[in-house]
Amino acid sequence: MSKVWFITGASRGFGRSWAEAAVARGDRVAVAARNGAALQAFADECGDAVLPLPLDITDRAAVFAAVERAHAHFGRLDVVVNNAGVGHIGCVEEVTEHEARAVIEANILGTLAVIQAALPLLRAQGGGHLIQVSSSGGIEAYPGMGLYCATKWALEGMSEALAAEVAPFGIKVTVLEPGGYATGWFSAAPRSVPHPAYGPLHDALDPTLTPDALPSPEVTVPALFALVDSVDPPLRLPLGSFALRAATEAGERRLDGLSAWEAVIRGADGLSATDGTPHPQEAGQGI
């Protein structure tokens, strides 16, 4: 059976590539983004299979209206892709409060609005799949991108809790963790005013932000389709070898740290660490 998609950030990059591929395989897609002209041109090419929805995801009321319109137009929503967001480059000390709020508004609150708008509809129809687009920066944090990575780590935590909350309703949640792709992220990401103290870090970072060659987002389509067509999709799915390596190495570093500090960690249980009494959390008494 063909699927109905709702994809944010669909005017370029991952969102556009995934929307084009979904239509090409016979699915129908509601595409949302701030660039309404690009969406309309795409819809003109594809006809009734595409519903263009100009949308700024930081406008909560507009998000709810767009999701409800897409559901009413197509009759259901099978896959909701939270792809829209913004990047930011700057060391933690360099980021202004205004810059931090802009990243959080888009990457967390905007994503939250889409989730909350979609859930009642998915629950009523008996299921659906929420795809949360994180990043390899949601696996490990990179110097010079602290606030951006913070939002992706927040997305990962929110999505993990969400997956457990909505599983009884037949709703699936997957966090995508792409590595670097030619999406235009690097050139579009705002930058904080650099502080002289971090000059060496920026000198080392800047060449990595302007790579000569990155894979096209189109190459991720087979992985995405395998994911949404699976009856048992994973909670997290790294995309690409870079992201897989990041996930593997981050996991190994955490395990090494736990092993090296295990005695200190267990000592923080107090008496339960020495008298055999189960910790309240381990005994199922919650946090």
Image (cartoon, rainbow, N blue to C red):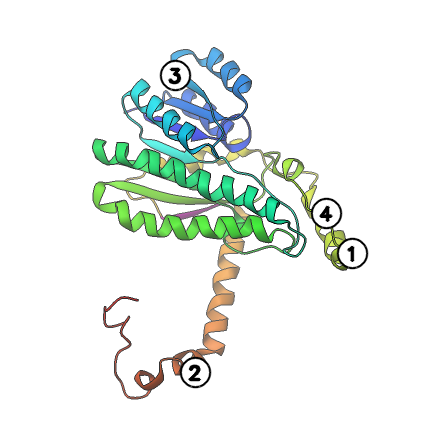
Task: State which region is magenta.
Answer: 235-239
Majority SS type along the magenta span: strand
Query: Which amino acid type corresponds to the residue marked 4 in the rendered image?
Result: Val
Q: CA distance from mark 1 to mark 3?
A: 52 Å
Relative side of 147 to 205, left or right: left
Q: Earlier in the sequence, mark 2 or mark 1?
A: 1
Quadrant hosting residue 263: bottom left
Query: Which amino acid type corresponds to the residue marked 3 in the rendered image?
Result: Ala
Q: Which callout, 2 or 1, points to the residue nearer the camera?
A: 1
Q: Earlier in the sequence, mark 3 or mark 4?
A: 3
Quadrant hosting residue 287: bottom left
Is label 3 in a helix, a strand or a loop?
A: helix
Is label 2 in a helix, a strand or a loop?
A: helix
Query: Which amino acid type corresponds to the residue marked 2 in the rendered image?
Result: Ala
Q: CA distance from mark 4 to mark 1?
A: 10 Å
Residue 242: percent from left, percent from top: 56, 49
> What residue is shown with label 1?
196
**Dot 1 surroundings within 10 Å: few (below 14), some, or many (20 or more)?**
few
> What residue is shown with label 2?
263
Residue 18: percent from left, percent from top: 46, 29
> What residue is shown with label 3?
49
Q: Nearer the viewer, residue 94 or 115?
A: 94
> What residue is shown with label 4?
193
Is label 1 in a helix, a strand or a loop?
A: helix
Residue 44: percent from left, percent from top: 48, 11
Is label 4 in a helix, a strand or a loop?
A: loop
Asked if the residues shown at circle 3 and circle 4 are in contact, with their CB atoms under 8 angstroms apart, the answer is no
**Dot 4 surroundings within 10 Å: few (below 14), some, or many (20 or more)?**
few
Asked if the residues shown at circle 1 and circle 3 are in contact, with their CB atoms under 8 angstroms apart, the answer is no
Q: Earlier in the sequence, mark 1 or mark 3?
A: 3
**Looking at the image, residue 247 lies above or below residue 120:** below
Do we see residue 159 in this rendering? yes
